[in-house]
Image (spheres, rainbow, N blue to C red):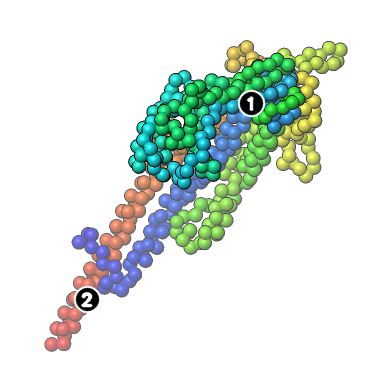
Amino acid sequence: MSNIKLSGMVSGLDTDTIIKQLMQVERAPLDKLTQQKQKIAWKRDEYREMNTMLTSIRSLADKMRFSTTFNKQSATSSNTSVVTANASSTATSGSYAIQVDRLASSALVTGATVSVDSTKSLVTANGTITIEGANGKSVDVNMTAGTTTYDSIIKQVNAANVGVTLSFDSINKRFVASTSATGESATILITGNGATELGFATMANPQKGSDASVQVNGQLMTFANNAFELNGVRFDLKGVSTNATSVTVAKDTGNIVDQIKSFVDQYNTLVDKVNEKTKAVPIRSYLPLTDEQKENMSEKQVELWETKAKTGLLYRDDILTDALSSLRSALMNKVDGLATISNGVKTGIDTISDIGITFKKYVPGLTGELGKLDLDETKLKDAIASNPDGVMNLFTKTSTLDPKDKNYQKESGIAERLYSTLNTQINKVMKRIGTGRISDAADGSQLGEQIRGLNSRMDVLKMRMKVAEDRYYKQFTAMELALQKLNSKGSWLTSQLGQ
């Protein structure tokens, strides 16, 4: 009887609605915990967004810690239709005069015109054709009249990997054999009584390709390919020339400027985002919506509500404010050991202001610009042009001290400081929010512990609600049964009085 629910069968009451309204009161503590859990989840998402930005800047700082970022070379050709060039980080600065007398070519054998409409056609005579490439590699193809197709011959030759490709020129109705390699070492030899079936004449000597003939700074050189490397520079030959083409190799100062500009831009974006997150005051009257509340609202209303509810989740956050303060300190302080002062004149580069980077000054009405970096690109380019090694050392200098030494940061380059500082801040964020790759039950982060505690309390409340709901149904069921008995007795009395 305890499991039977008599929902107003006797009393006529809407028992389910009444109990639902009673359970709303019972659910209030659970809804409060659910809202707290939702706010923690939103807070964790905002931390992850900030962590992504910090990680992006750390990646850039990591590149700028190494001299290879500042030692990139660029190669410029005065005539890219003749030769193009690419310099590696090991290339030495200098200039080259390149005159291309002849390009390297592959070996090529063209057959006579044949009366073949399609490679699907069948050969008309029996025979064997042997095609030999370089290093003695060859393939023999047997042909049977009325059975073998030209297409099968092409496929068999090309699949043999002898360094020779066979194709059919459908416009001029002829077969063509060519080597994939270039140079005099690339050869083709066609023999066999079946050669004439494809329009080829039997060859006594192999057809050879030709080497490239190039004059480099007046020195005649030959190459099997249309590309060669010299002093860390790759030259790609594109065409012949009667005059020398100038190729200049120099330090890629544009790359250095781009790297530093990218850092300044990313840093300023970080300042904006941190200020946005830490200075937005929470709107206490907007709490996360319950499922029941969402049912009575449109998607747009829910979106607008949650936007306000998410405001100020990281208000005055200690990790983010400390991150900006630490980064600012790393940028402001000079790097010891890079500059000297003699008779009041400074020689060398040991601060970011020496290369045109300064912190923006206060301007009335523009408080949001405080803490951002300002870049004088002209001064930066001048510093790179006049002292490229000084600029590089400003970012890449390493300290010989123990990292725990109080002077370690002072002797470290700007990029090393930034990388170390960002590592520390990112680890703090990870400690607070976890990795995001494990379940709440196993998440040992600070927010993970909070969520796990809320889940435990919510489970207890859900059990209590189930007990309360069952109790209400039992009480109403008992009332319905009592009314049923009362009605039965009333009917019996009525019948007795009627007799």
- Of 234 and 228, which appears nearest the observer? 228
Q: Secondary structure at mark 2?
A: helix
| Residue occupying the point 75% across, 23% down | 244
Picture coordinates of residue 154, whole percent (x, y): 43, 36
Q: CA distance from mark 1 to mark 2?
A: 112 Å
**Quick one: which residue is furthest to the bottom in this view?**
499
Q: Closer to us: mark 1 or mark 2?
A: 1
Picture coordinates of residue 435, whole percent (x, y): 47, 34
Residue type for callout 2: Asn
Q: Is residue 119 above or below residue 162?
A: below
Q: Which mark is residue 103?
A: 1
Residue 385 seen anywhere in this rendered image of the structure: yes
Q: Is residue 162 above or below residue 472?
A: above
Task: Using the rendered view, name the quadrant where residue 68 is placed.
Answer: top right
Picture coordinates of residue 113, whole percent (x, y): 51, 39
Task: Using the rendered view, name the quadrant where residue 373 is placed.
Answer: top right
Q: Quadrant of the C terminus?
A: bottom left
Horizontal side of residue 247 vs 179, given as left or right: right
| Residue occupying the point 55% across, 59% down | 300
Q: Which mark is residue 485?
A: none
Horizontal side of residue 455 vs 4, given as left or right: right
Picture coordinates of residue 207, whole percent (x, y): 53, 25
Residue type for callout 1: Leu
Q: Quadrant of the N terminus?
A: bottom left
Residue annotated with mark 2: 487
Q: Secondary structure at mark 1?
A: loop
